[in-house]
Image (cartoon, rainbow, N blue to C red):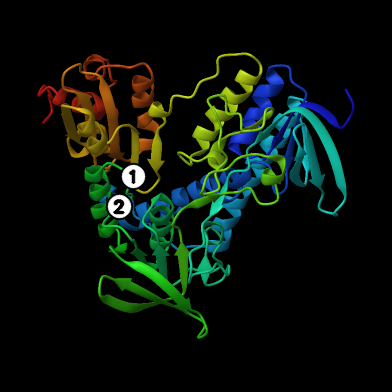
Amino acid sequence: MANNAFDLIVIGAGPGGYVAAIRAAQLGMHVACVEREYLGGTCLNVGCIPSKAMLDSTHRLADAQHHLSRRGISVQGISVDLPAMMKFKTDVVKKMSDGVGFLFRKNNITHIAGAARIASAGNVEVTANDDTKATYSAGKILIATGSAPISIKGLPFDGKYVLSSTEALSIPAIPKKLIVVGGGYIGVELGSVWARLGSDVHVIEFLDRILPPSDTEMALALQKLLQKQGLKFQFNTTAESVDTSSGTVKLKWKSGDQTGVEEADAVLVAVGRRPVTDGLGLAEAGVATDARGYVIVNGDFQTSVPGIYAIGDVIGGLMLAHKAEEEGIAAVERMAGHAGHVNYGACPSVVYTHPELAAVGLTEQQAAARGPIKIGKFPLAANGRARGMDEPDGLVKIIGDAKTDRLLGVHILSAHASDMIAEATIAIEFAASVEDLARAFHAHPTLPEAIKEAALAADKGAIHI
């Protein structure tokens, strides 16, 4: 095969793209992956990984400042070295990005650095950083270009005063006050980071609570805990414009008939993400998109043009790295004649605040709309391991079908909820019943015992409450 000819060209090396490239190589395809910025994409470089590094570092700080003394551990003279914290984050990112490069080499995947444009079905033109162009051919093309932060009218990003999530991970000095526009998971996670570091964090949300897609009860429970941690929330409010001429941010807001101005050092705009299709040449290639710019695909992840496929954030749906990974694997398996499949109903989500909020399956509201349900709850305060860890905040909520006992949803507000949700995800994937969770062994003492107890509670059989 010629040096510029491949079985598959993947455009984008984020979690969806690089995982798809590796799986395709495992299936015997000759694969190239085009990436214009950095291996690992947004998630690894300016999203999931660096944000979790910052969340973990600042959680340890908060623990030392407010909780260790209760356990007989005295910490004197604790301080924050923000440059060192940022360096740790950067080191983590570099190691992970280098790891993707290693996996490419291991699987004989050709990494092509540059910006891709689909010249036609089967042909991709790549413009390198030095503006030289080269055209590569492939039997199939997979678009995995991800998403980018949405900018809203009146609050254009400038990287200094009006920040996207990317800049909010690298603020050079701890702001005295930070306004966060948007109470979704990015807003509350990054708001938590800077609140722990000492910022006065004020969250402005258009709707009436944080985390609108989440189970209402669980989101409100987390909201109360975040308020105790110092975050301030202003709901039913629209951020209209900013004035930065004085060297600070003066944000004009409106709530009903009321208006006001909030002043801060910076404002983080975290109101959602848009598909990245800039410069791809989709219209010219005949690839159809919807009214919001998402690439339209069929059940095989194929676009309107035979031989061109798309996965991940660029096709919409849940904007989660693990969703993109599963789509990438399923797409290339189908290309190779295998039975790739994605069960979106078993896709977990996690908000990495403290405590964490993790969920899989239906919310109470979604489940109730389908028919009679039963609900079991168990507070972490009644869990021995949670008490021993001094992490008693939160609860587990189990939702089941009242007639069939089918497990419909699991919601966990707890320390380490991101780890605990794996059990529930497998249970949903295998169509377990609530009784299955209730009767399964759970080691003692562990946090997952709260899942067992919540399942027992759905049939009024909980032991420890």
Q: From the viewer's perspective, is residue 128 above or below residue 178?
A: above
Mark 2 residue type: His
Q: Name the residue under label 1.
A: 213
Q: Mark 2 points at which residue?
A: 67
Tell me residue 261's x, y (percent): 36, 79
- Whole-Å distance between the Cαs marked 1 and 2? 32 Å
Q: Is mark 1 on a helix, strand or loop?
A: loop
Which numbered marker is on residue 363? none
Q: Is mark 2 on a helix, strand or loop?
A: loop
Which quarter of the rendering shows the N terminus? Answer: top right
Residue at position x 29%, y 20% from top? 443
Residue at position x 44%, y 52% from top? 186
Disc count in the image? Answer: 2
Tell me residue 117's x, y (percent): 75, 44
Residue 12 visible (yes or no): yes
Instruction: Place residue 121 in its image quadrant.
Output: top right
How many other residues sit within 10 Å of disc 2, few (<14), some (14-19) or many (≥20)? some
Q: Are marks 1 and 2 in contact (CB under 8 Å)?
A: no
Q: Could you tell which of marks 1 and 2 lies nearer the N-terminus? A: 2
Residue 176 visible (yes or no): no
Left or right: 53 as drawn, with respect to 104: left
